Image (cartoon, rainbow, N blue to C red):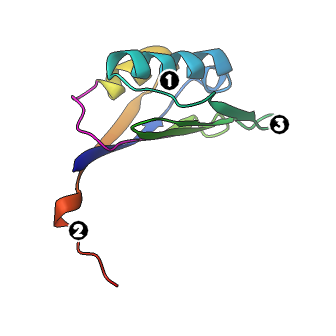
Amino acid sequence: MSGVEWLIEAFDCDPAALRDLNLLRRFLDTLAAQLPLHPVGTPVWHRFPSPGGITGMCLLSESHFACHTFPEHGSMTVNLFCCRPRPEWDFAGYLEREFGAGRVTVRRLERDYAAVEVFA
């Protein structure tokens, strides 16, 4: 069994976009449709008081999606973990277009569970 985890950080984003819950919902919906992913329940979103952002979490049959926006710093973080391999996805391009990100880092971690030692 193996999987993949993406750790994404976006900087110099549009603060108004980072406060827009509809944009974040569309981001999750787009990922779910294109990767494909399968939510096992309703995503949970929390808005912090201004100037704070939004935190979101969605359990997936593949694992989870989480994001945190920081409008006061123009940044956001995203974590997507899938217990089965998935194709590459243009996180940077999407975040640049939809959130005005000036810089995006994407780290893809391959998870190979057969190589993990279990300690009793």
Q: Is mark 2 on a helix, strand or loop?
A: loop
Q: Is 1 placed left or right of 67 in the picture?
A: left
Q: What element carries label 3?
A: loop
Q: Residue 116 carries which label?
A: 2
| Residue 61 locus on image (x, y percent) | 44, 36
Q: Is 50 placed left or right of 89 in the picture?
A: right
Label 3 vs 2, first from the N-terminus? 3
Check if residue 87 falls in the magenta segment.
yes
Q: Mark 3 points at which residue?
A: 49
Mark 1 is surrounded, within 10 Å at the Cα level, by few (under 14), some (14 to 19) or many (20 or more) other residues, namely: some
| Residue 13 locus on image (x, y percent) | 52, 28
Q: Quadrant of residue 97?
A: top left
In this rendered view, identify the residue nearer to me: 70 or 42. Answer: 42
Q: Say above or below: 81 vs 31.
A: below
Which residue ends up furthest to the bottom in the rendered image? 120
* Residue visible at 24% across and 32% down in the picture: 86
Q: In which quarter of the image is residue 9?
A: top left
In the image, the segment drawn in magenta is 78-89
